[in-house]
Image (tube, rainbow, N blue to C red):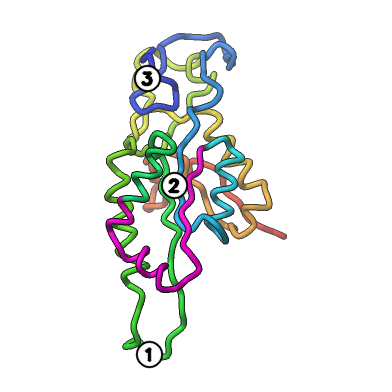
Amino acid sequence: MSGKSQFEQGHSAPVKHQKVPGLESELSLIMFPTPRKALTTRGDSGIGRSIAILYVMEGADSFIAYLPEEEKDAQETKNDRDNCKKLVDAAVKAMGGIDILVNNHAYQMMVEDIKDPSDFNTNIYPFFYLSKYTLPHMKKGIAPGPVWTPLIPSTMTDEAMKQFVSPMGRPSQLSEIATCFVFLASIDSSPISGQTIHANGGVVNALPQGRLQPTAARVQRTF
């Protein structure tokens, strides 16, 4: 056992055999990962608000940033890299860190000609500034792949279990795959049809003729 929870990068599952088909109760798993800390820009309405609310419902700490109604103040706030740093510093101080950054802010207005003034300073630069100042506070991102189920210790050899990792550094956990299915079964996934969610940690299995083998759930909407 690595001493880390199964949700941490670098976790290595113990080489321990079970009788087929295996028991999940003997996997010594932590049922819930450490709550995440999320910073969402423009989190007071629209998509940002929906994201922030769902994060809270899932137990995460959620820090939102929003702008005053006055256009002049809004532009001054959005275009200033110093304010981006102040925002990140405030989020770190309030939550003790940042695990998730949702760059949701933007300004939209229809124009008649491509030569008309654009809002590049709002819709482009702050994304880089916020990412730049947030990254030092974040752990390395991971997206686990091969799943550690009771079948692994009950059917694999010692060497196979030692090598049961993904390019992201650890096996996927049961709850991480289950939530994919919950999402696909919910009304929230209605816009998704004919798509595959690859919860595979970077593992891509190639078939003959260059076709790709999906390694997770697929949904086809009929309603």
> Residue 21's x, y, as percent?
59, 16
Task: Check the image and report above or below for 141 versus 162.
Answer: below
> Residue 63's x, y, as percent?
48, 45
Q: Amino acid at mark 1?
A: Asp
Q: Which quarter of the image is occupied by the C terminus?
A: bottom right
Q: Residue at x 48, y 19 (%)?
A: 152
Q: Residue at x 37, y 19 (%)?
A: 12
Residue at mark 2: 39
Which sits earlier in the primary sequence, circle 1 or circle 2?
2
Q: Quadrant of residue 1?
A: top left
Q: Residue furthest right?
A: 223
Q: Amino acid at mark 2?
A: Leu
Q: Residue at x 41, y 68 (%)?
A: 73
Q: Is residue 68 magenta?
A: yes
Residue at mark 1: 113
Q: Is residue 124 magenta?
A: no
> Residue 196's x, y, as percent?
52, 50
- Mark 1 element type: loop
In contact (CB < 8 Å): disc 1 and disc 3: no
Tell us which disc is closer to us: 2 or 3: 2
Rendered image: mark on residue 174: none
- Binning the other alpha carbons within 10 Å of mark 3 as few (below 14), some (14 to 19) or many (20 upward) gives many
In contact (CB < 8 Å): disc 1 and disc 2: no
Tell us which disc is closer to us: 1 or 2: 2
Residue at mark 3: 12
Q: Nearer the viewer, residue 62 or 113?
A: 62
Q: Amino acid at mark 3?
A: Ser
In contact (CB < 8 Å): disc 2 and disc 3: no
Which sits earlier in the primary sequence, circle 2 or circle 3?
3
Q: The magenta stretch spans which residues?
A: 61-85
